[in-house]
Image (cartoon, helix red, strand yellow):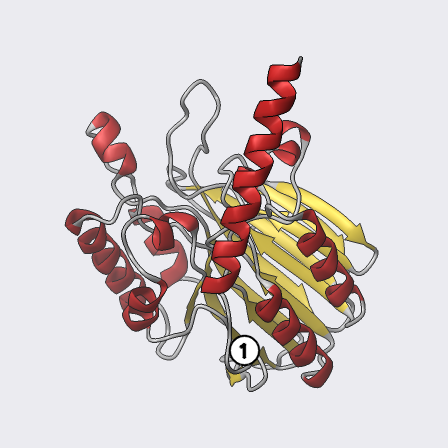
Amino acid sequence: MKRLILLAATALIIASCDIALFDEKLSLDDNPFIFPIVIESGKDGNDTLDFIVISDAHLNRELRDSNIWRNTDNFLLFIEESDVDAVLLLGDMIDDAVDIDYESMHSFLSLMKERLDDGTPIIYTLGNHDANKGSSVEAWEKEFGQGSMEAYRISDTMIYKLNSSFRIFGHDQLKALEDAMRNNRAGYNIILTHVPLGAKGLDQSLFEFTIADIDERNALLKIIDENGSALTFSGHHHKGAVLNSWSDRHKEYIFSAFHKRDLFGLESEGYYFLVRLNQQNGDVSILGFQIDNTNPEIDNPDIEVNFRI
């Protein structure tokens, strides 16, 4: 028993040191959320916003594991036939910081851009594999031409892209978000974070699968709760399709991974999603499609979740 207590105490000390180190990496001189980038909706009327969402592509992971390459044709056909306001990528596009992963990411993004309507933005959220596997946050910001923390406005909805790649948010980022949300008043707020705020079962007790500092999580929940109706979108733990209800006005959805590898039932089957937000009444629909679905029809999704915020 004493040994277990000592090991637990040691792990806690190490985690605390890591949190302090990463908090310094997330220090800010200016508020990256205070002046949102305006996105014009390409649809007639703007009552409903549509987003394509994918998380945890981990490009080339299953190719290295099994010499099998994912089927992306169905996904590319789906986005070509969809009229969306933005594509939201929730992190971990690459698996390792090696040339072949970067090349695959460039190819995948190019194919997506070819099939999207001109001007449809692709908003990318950093994941832990993106930032912690030999690449820097600065390199990713240059790669995508966007900061790792940013704000966007579409109609009456604000989108806040947070950097959770170190599994924390840091004091500066939370304070900047709080100030910006008070300033950029909107009917709805969408929070993008790679690492979930909370999970289910065993995942809830392992900081690797959720935000490491529960005080930070609670601080973020308080900020969100004080500033209207909100959606939090996250990924990271692969076995997603989890809906967390933090309050009547704030729901978090953890998305299944786009990456496909079902190892003893512990990995994702490979999904991409269409999210619809009705800005008139707060109705939200999340439609999930398996990447092997050869006939992905909006009226016949493989996963469907409906709720209101």
In this view, the residue farthest toward the right is: 248
Q: Locate residue 232, reporting x and y percent.
A: 64, 57
Q: Name the spot of residue 203 as percent of width and height, x first.
A: 61, 32
Residue matched to label 1: 152
Which quadrant of the figure contains the C terminus? bottom right
The N terminus appears in which quarter of the rendering? top right
- 284 in relation to 287, above or below: below
Q: Is residue 184 left or right of residue 130?
A: right
Residue 135 to residue 120: above or below: above
User: Quick one: 294 or 121, which is closer to the camera?
Assistant: 121
For label 1, the SS is strand
Say whether residue 258 is visible: yes
**Residue 239 position within the rendered picture, expressed as x and y whole percent measured from the top left:** 53, 34
Mark 1: few/some/many CA within 10 Å (<14, 14-19, 20+) = many
Q: Nearer the viewer, residue 215 or 142?
A: 215
Q: Residue at x 26, y 55 (%)?
A: 105
Q: Is residue 298 above or below residue 45?
A: above
**Residue found at the far top of this picture:** 1
Q: Nearer the viewer, residue 260 or 44?
A: 260
